[in-house]
Image: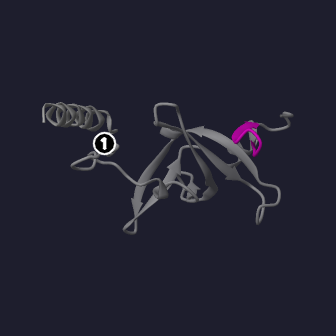
Amino acid sequence: MKTAAIAAAIAFALSGDALAQTPTAPQPASTLASLPVNSVTVTNYYKQNVYDSSDTKIGEVADVLVDAEGRVTALIVSVGGFLGVGEKDVAVPFTAVRNVPKDGKWRLVMNTSKDALKAAPGYTYDRTKTQWVPEGSKG
């Protein structure tokens, strides 16, 4: 009887250790109870037309660049060309583009011209490196 009681105690102790060592379920990622004030969706920028201050289309946002901390730092704007032929992609600071309301919608506006963008250094997307590189550079 004593042996049975000792065996039961050992089994109980071992089962407690086993339970204590059982991995816990992964914790859910942090969430927000509310959205940050004045936040907007990236779709307000990505693939949207860009206009100059005279309301002339000067390009289209081809990409949105984000730094290691998750902050939007720059936009790649496609300028010139027709149906993708002869286009040039240039980088502009995110702060150079502003959302301006027009006819109940947002419109991206820059204080520059199409010619100024065409004269800026160009970039191409390197699919191997998955990053934008200066035009003409070999990866």
Taking the image as shown, residue 29 lies to the left or right of residue 75, namely: left
Q: Quadrant of residue 112?
A: top right
Q: Name the foreground residue: 67 vs 134.
A: 67
The answer to whether residue 87 of the structure is visible from this angle is yes
Q: Which residues are magenta?
A: 125-133
Q: Position of residue 120 (x, y in %)?
A: 72, 38
Taking the image as shown, residue 122 lies to the left or right of residue 45, namely: right
- Relative to 33, does residue 3 appear above or below in the rendering? above
Q: Position of residue 35 (x, y in %)?
A: 27, 49
Q: Position of residue 77 (x, y in %)?
A: 64, 49
Task: Give the position of the N terminus as an image quadrant.
Answer: top left
Residue sticking out furthest to the front: 1
How many neighbours does mark 1 have within 10 angstroms: few (below 14), some (14-19), or many (20 or more)? few
The residue sitting at 61% across, 59% down in the picture is 57
Task: Give the position of the C terminus as an image quadrant.
Answer: top right
Q: Position of residue 124 (x, y in %)?
A: 76, 43
- Residue 131: say if magenta: yes
Q: Quadrant of residue 12?
A: top left
Q: Name the foreground residue: 61 vs 7.
A: 7
Disc 1 secondary structure class: loop
Taking the image as shown, residue 106 lies to the left or right of residue 8, namely: right
Residue sticking out furthest to the bottom: 103
The residue sitting at 28% across, 45% down in the picture is 36
The residue where tag 1 is placed is 30
Q: Name the foreground residue: 80 vs 64.
A: 64
Q: Quadrant of residue 11?
A: top left
The answer to whether residue 113 of the structure is visible from this angle is no
Taking the image as shown, residue 47 lies to the left or right of residue 38, namely: right
- Disc 1 marks a residue whose amino acid type is Ser
Q: How is the image coloured?
A: one colour
